[in-house]
Image (cartoon, grey):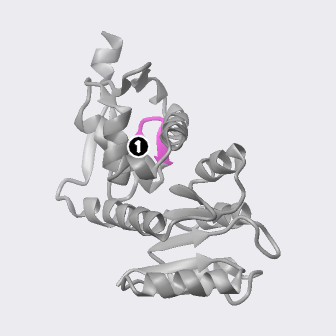
């Protein structure tokens, strides 16, 4: 049974979501003290976090940032705020998805299922290390390493990189990436993918690898091997 941490201060909404998710055989936890979110997160060790933006003490962005310093656990924002910058901010902080209130529960459960299936199933593959453009990509630890150092990726970022490397030197369409990431493209915005890829490329730039993930306007993305990029 997967453990979900629902960081929501609206008790009525919390109980409604908890009851629905419990019906899907998820073990759902809440926060008792909103000034001690990280302590409770550490004690619970959830498999996925669902978090509101507007919370007592500190907002959801603060806690997302704090969680990311401790863990790469999948994070879904669930908020009534509808400004595009809220979604962009959540993605930049390392969230995996953003759902706006009011929402259809079927959409929430579909996103939860897709993320859990993606995060906790693909790491069972026997091959956890891959070399690419002079770097080693560790799919299990979500780390990319080369002579310039190491960077840590989120689950979404390493999964995107994995798909691109598997199709190296070939264009992977945005639609294919969306289907692979979220299983059903109806449940994810095109902007979410753009933010994730841009964030991945920015991190790779720290190792001098950013230029090897190219955007093909109107087509998709391509991961280029070093010898092809130089030749």
Q: Residue at x 32, y 66 (%)?
A: 120
Residue 82: give x, y in percent of width and height. Answer: 70, 52
Q: Residue at x 47, y 83 (%)?
A: 20
Q: Secondary structure at mark 1?
A: strand
The reply, left or right, for residue 117 in relation to residue 81 is: left
In which quadrant of the rendered image does the C terminus lie?
Answer: top left
Q: Is residue 178 visible?
A: yes
In which quadrant of the rendered image does the N terminus lie?
Answer: bottom left
Residue 12: give x, y in percent of width and height. Answer: 67, 86
Q: Residue at x 73, y 87 (%)?
A: 33
Task: Relative to 169, say whether 43 is above or below.
Answer: below
Outermost residue, top side:
231
Looking at the rendering, the stretch of residues picked out in magenta corresponds to 146-151
Task: Relative to 139, say whether 197 is above or below.
Answer: above
Residue 77: give x, y in percent of width and height. Answer: 60, 62
Q: Pointer 1: what residue?
A: 145
The reply, left or right, for residue 63 in relation to residue 137 is: right
Outermost residue, left side:
126
Mark 1 residue crowding within 10 angstroms, few (<14) / some (14–19) / many (20+): some
Question: Magenta stretch: dominant SS?
Answer: strand
| Magenta residue check for 132 | no
Residue 121: give x, y in percent of width and height. Answer: 27, 64
- Residue 107: name its quadrant: bottom left
């Amino acid at each position: 049974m997967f453990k979900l941490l629902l960081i929501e201060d609206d008790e009525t909404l919390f109980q409604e979501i908890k009851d629905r998710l419990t019906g899907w055989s998820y073990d759902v936890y809440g926060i008792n003290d909103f000034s001690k979110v990280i302590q409770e997160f550490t004690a619970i060790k959830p498999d996925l976090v669902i978090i509101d933006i507007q919370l007592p003490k500190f907002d959801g962005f603060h806690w997302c940032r704090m969680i990311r310093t401790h863990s790469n656990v999948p994070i879904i924002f669930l908020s009534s705020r509808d400004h595009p910058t809220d979604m962009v901010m959540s993605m930049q902080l390392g969230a995996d998805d953003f759902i706006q209130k009011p929402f259809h529960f079927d959409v929430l459960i579909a996103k939860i299922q897709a993320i859990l299936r993606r995060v906790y199933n693909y790491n069972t593959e026997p091959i956890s290390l891959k070399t690419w453009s002079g770097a080693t990509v560790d799919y299990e630890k979500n780390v990319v390493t080369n002579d310039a150092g190491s960077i840590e990726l989120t689950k979404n970022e390493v999964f995107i990189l994995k798909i691109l490397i598997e199709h190296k030197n070939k264009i992977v369409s945005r639609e294919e990436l969306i289907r692979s990431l979220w299983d059903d493209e109806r449940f994810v915005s095109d902007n979410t993918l753009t933010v994730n890829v841009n964030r991945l490329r920015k991190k790779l730039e720290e190792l001098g690898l950013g230029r090897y993930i190219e955007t093909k306007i109107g087509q998709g993305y391509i991961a280029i091997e070093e010898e092809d990029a130089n030749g």
